[in-house]
Amino acid sequence: MNVIVLFYFVFYLVSTDGVFTFVLGTQESAQWSAGTGLGSLPQVSYSSGEKRVTVSLECKNDGPTEFEALGEDPINNYKFRLVDRCACWDKCAGK
């Protein structure tokens, strides 16, 4: 029997006091972009209603994983940067 494992991702924004949470995007809305041209980073985007999340993927062959929130600009558009070896082409194949 073949088993397919799907990971479910939902991006949440949580207020600094932990009282409010907002859904920023769901896995079902995921869209892949290889980048806009030579030297640009690939991206994965998610959305929920008017909110949109863009995660830039940066290849790093070694060292710790970095996940950085870059901010909201313009309003309801949240930008993040993920730096990891799995962002390198075929570095996490078979996982």
Image (spheres, rainbow, N blue to C red):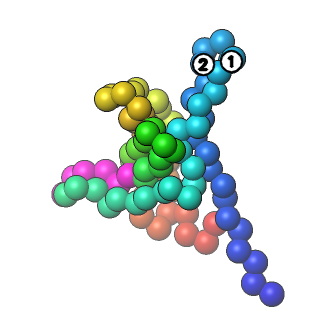
Q: Which is nearer the eye, 32 or 84? A: 32
Residue 28 can be seen in this image: yes
Q: Indicate the amino acid at tag 2.
A: Ser
The disc at residue 37 is none
Q: Give how far across and how far down residue 37 sits, in percent.
A: 19, 57
Label 2: state its secondary structure. Answer: loop
Q: Residue furthest right?
A: 1
Q: Is residue 12 above or below residue 93?
A: above
Q: Indicate the amino acid at tag 1.
A: Gly
Q: Which is nearer the eye, 41 or 59? A: 41
Name the residue beneath numbered marker 2: 15
Quadrant of the rendered image containing residue 10: top right
Q: Give how far across and how far down residue 38 sits, in percent.
A: 19, 57
Q: Taken as a whole, is the magenta stretch helix, strand or loop?
A: loop
Q: Is residue 38 above or below residue 74?
A: below
Q: How many marks?
A: 2
Membership of 91 in magenta stretch:
no
Q: Is residue 11 above or below residue 6?
A: above
Name the residue beneath numbered marker 1: 18
Instruction: Give the magenta part as a residue range.
Output: 38-43
Q: Residue furthest left?
A: 38
Q: Is residue 76 above or below residue 36?
A: above
Q: Which is nearer the eye, 74 or 33? A: 74
Q: Give how far across and how far down residue 23 sits, in percent.
A: 58, 37
The residue drawn where x is 31% and y is 29% is: 74
Residue 66 can be seen in this image: no
CB within 8 Å, label 1 to label 2: yes
Which corner quadrant holds the N terminus? Answer: bottom right
Label 1: state its secondary structure. Answer: loop
